[in-house]
Image: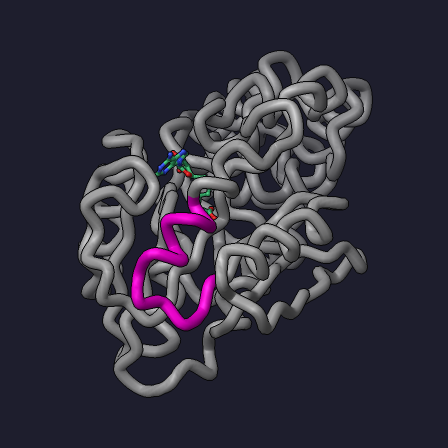
Amino acid sequence: MPSPFAGPGVREALDSALVALNAAKVDSPRLDAEVLLGHALGVDRTTLWLDPDREVTGDAARWFRDAIRRRTVERVPVAYLVGHKGFRHLDLHVDARVLVPRPETEHLVEALLELPSGARVHDVGTGSGAIALALKDERPDLRVSASDVSPDALAVAHANAERLGLDVTFSQGDLLDGIDPHVDVVVSNPPYVQDGDRASMAPEVVGHEPKLALFAGADGLRTIRPLVTQAAATDAELLALEVGAGQAPAVRALVAAAGFPEVETVCDLAGHERVVLGRR
Ligand SMILES: C[S@@+](CC[C@H](N)C(=O)[O-])C[C@H]1O[C@@H](n2cnc3c(N)ncnc32)[C@H](O)[C@@H]1O
């Protein structure tokens, strides 16, 4: 039995947070409440379920209240509030300087796990470093480099690499400008959102994630087009791109026309054509 003098327990804290999260119509209210309360208390979600009477007081209670306010009123993504996001087997630091890595991007990493030993891979638009770092983690024999046009994003990627002890070389630049053309694979999850989609996007995304990471002109292909051309001018035998829903046919055509005639598409768990692979 909790003491009658104790502060609210986990159960009550979650219940009142759920009222606010449901009213704000966030996508996954229970998950958000549990992740945020777990972070406030420094425990995982299983511990919350096993100990619903654990007290939520002091700094933890204050942090949790403020996090729920920022989540419901400001619509800050949970990953920015807790400062990290799981991707493949890694826990990556993330903040507003980088896109929150998405589960669908894991398909891009998966598509590269069978590369020949020692292959040289360059990740364009690395953001938090998600793709490059997950590849190096799962295939330590690969020689992985990564770049981004945003120095802020590179600072996050670099710090993630250091913390995780993963040997990836980072550089700053526009697409493949200045990148050693002697690579075997170019991989990228580039910006691909159509400018016109802005009005219908979740407030978490448009209001908080870097615009540079999202938008790519009227058809969403403004970044992919020059990237495909530049990748064809390197030694890369494989080009692997994440694309937006509905973009795969156009990207397949671009990739084939640029000189990667064997084109394949990988679907995500929702059945959308998500990854385009071009080989030569
Ligand atoms: C969709 S985010 C992907 C981030 C990360 N790779 C991931 O999958 O989570 C796109 C990234 O491309 C970067 N970017 C945008 N335009 C670029 C350009 N012209 N050259 C290099 N990087 C660019 C952005 O800064 C952003 O980090």
Ligand 1 placement by image quarter:
top left
The mark tally for this picture is: 0
Q: Start and end of the magenta stretch? A: 227-239
Q: In terms of depth relative to the viewer, which is nearer, 224 or 258?
A: 258
Q: Residue at x 28, y 67 (%)?
A: 183
Quarter of image, res 74 = top right
Q: Residue at x 51, y 36 (%)?
A: 191
Quick check: 211 above or below 249? above
Residue 121 placement, left or right of 220:
left
Residue 100 seen by the camera: no
Q: Residue at x 35, y 50 (%)?
A: 129
Quick check: 199 above or below 171? above
Locate residue 157, reporting x and y percent. 28, 46
Q: Residue at x 41, y 81 (%)?
A: 115
Residue 24 placement, left or right of 192:
right
Quick check: 11 above or below 70? below
Quick check: 38 above or below 58? below
Task: Verify whether residue 236 appears in magenta.
Answer: yes
Task: Verify whether residue 53 appears in magenta.
Answer: no
Quarter of image, res 19 = top right
Locate residue 79, reporting x and y percent. 50, 38
Q: In terms of depth relative to the viewer, which is nearer, 14 or 242?
A: 242
Locate residue 185, reporting x and y percent. 37, 67
Q: In terms of depth relative to the viewer, which is nearer, 111 or 28?
A: 111
Locate residue 141, reporting x and y percent. 26, 81
Q: Residue furthest bottom?
A: 117
Residue 241 placement, left or right of 163:
right
Residue 96 seen by the camera: yes
Q: In terms of depth relative to the viewer, which is nearer, 55 or 182?
A: 182
Colour convention of the picture: one colour
